[in-house]
Image (cartoon, helix red, strand yellow):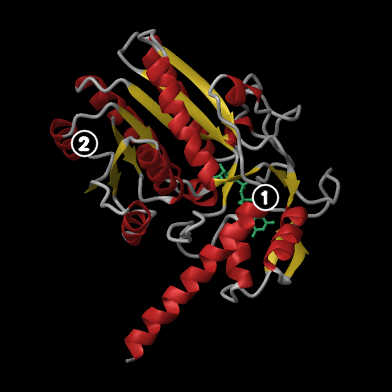
Amino acid sequence: MRILVTGGAGFIGSHTVVELRNAGYEPVIIDNFSNSNRSVLDGLKQILGEEVPFYEADCNDAGSLNAIFEKEKFDGVIHFAAYKAVGESVEKPLNYYDNNLGSTVLLLQTMIKYGVPHLVFSSSCTVYGQPEQLPVTEQTPRLPAESPYGNTKSICEDIIRDTVRSKAPVKGISLRYFNPVGAHPSALIGELPSGVPGNLVPYITQTAAGIREKLTVFGSDYNTPDGTCMRDFIHVVDLAKAHVQALKLLDGRQETSYYDVFNVGTGDGHTVLELIKTFEEVNHLKLNYSIGPRRPGDVEKIYAQVDKVNQVMGWRAEKSLADSLRDAWRWQQKLEEKSKKESGTSVA
Ligand code: WQD
């Protein structure tokens, strides 16, 4: 079965391409490299031993999308392509609404036009804001998003839900990710943040690599065991496998219209300091960090209740936080090796 993976050269998209291939699907990537790197395609080729069909295109470009759907016969779509920087979305909300909502609307219109029935959407636990109760279930009410980025995820879920409700020939699943971390064990693909990382783990690995001088822990006066924020950190390979399971669930549903949402996390919460300690232990190093002020907009603690995704979708996280942090560091070291080699050749 041929699956279109929008944003397939991105962090989660590329790992999902690997797991799709491993499960016997034929992934096809669309990516405009606005937040990813062409080198990911080489990494995928090394892991899979074959080229992944790829189109350099923008999911907001109707002409390109129609031409690709005209040429390819897709059985489903996994939609990752979106702007995802929380802070940037506050500064440039219109870019985020235009890109993230526009691409989802156009994708659905094109899927209906070409008779492509299944959509898996990349959503986020950010739709819950700071939940009253923990762990969060799929029934936990969505709260007004802390950022335009989070709001676009919530609105896209509604766009898909309402399209399904309109009896359009589409079945959809929204996967609400918790905090994706780590890298492929081969260290051939991983997270490639552009500029200064906003997210915790890439900032940690760049600090350990000496690229960043020191990690600042944003706040230690939260109502958690050690005062630092709590999150549900999920290995990106486990998260990628959840997308394969979601496609299988859609294939198995007989009804013409079906929509559901699933929390995709480990079900365990870990604090920022616990993560730092784990990183130091598994990688036998000391990290240079200090405690700083809270980061505005941060949620104090959130982690998933995972009964539904375990029981209904037949998926559960298999990798530990230690696995994620070992793989993240191995990937960072590979990046360092590569950049030293490249800078070495440029000197020669
Ligand atoms: C995690 C914790 C920070 C950096 C966001 C989005 C979510 C998803 C992942 C896109 C927080 C602390 C961080 C640092 C720190 N986005 N931290 N020092 O904010 O939970 O989630 O990114 O896919 O939708 O909401 O992730 O990694 O930025 O922060 O102390 O230098 O680490 O305060 O408590 P977050 P994060």
In the rendered image, is residue 202 in sight?
Answer: no
- Identity of the residue drawn at 46% across and 46% down: 12
Determine the residue positioned at 43% across, 76% down.
339
Is residue 63 or residue 277 the one in the foreground?
277
* Residue for badge 1: 321
Query: SS class of the residue under badge 1?
Result: helix
Determine the residue positioned at 59% across, 73% down: 209
The quadrant holding residue 30 is: top left
Judge from the rendering whether residue 301 lies leftward or rightward of residue 333; answer left or right: right
What residue lies at 18% left-to-right and 37% top-to-bottom?
A: 68
Amino acid type at mark 1: Leu
The 10 Å Cα crowd at callout 2, few under 14, some 14 to 19, many 20 or more, is many
Report the quarter where the N terminus lies: top left
Ligand 1 closer than 8 Å to label 1 CB: no
Q: Which residue is mark 2?
A: 65
Q: What quarter of the picture does the C terminus occupy?
A: bottom left
Q: Residue furthest bottom?
A: 348
**Is residue 199 or residue 13 the one in the foreground?**
13
The x, y position of residue 293, in whole percent, is 75, 58
Q: Is residue 157 left or right of residue 298?
A: left
Q: Percent from the top left, x then y, of residue 37?
A: 35, 59
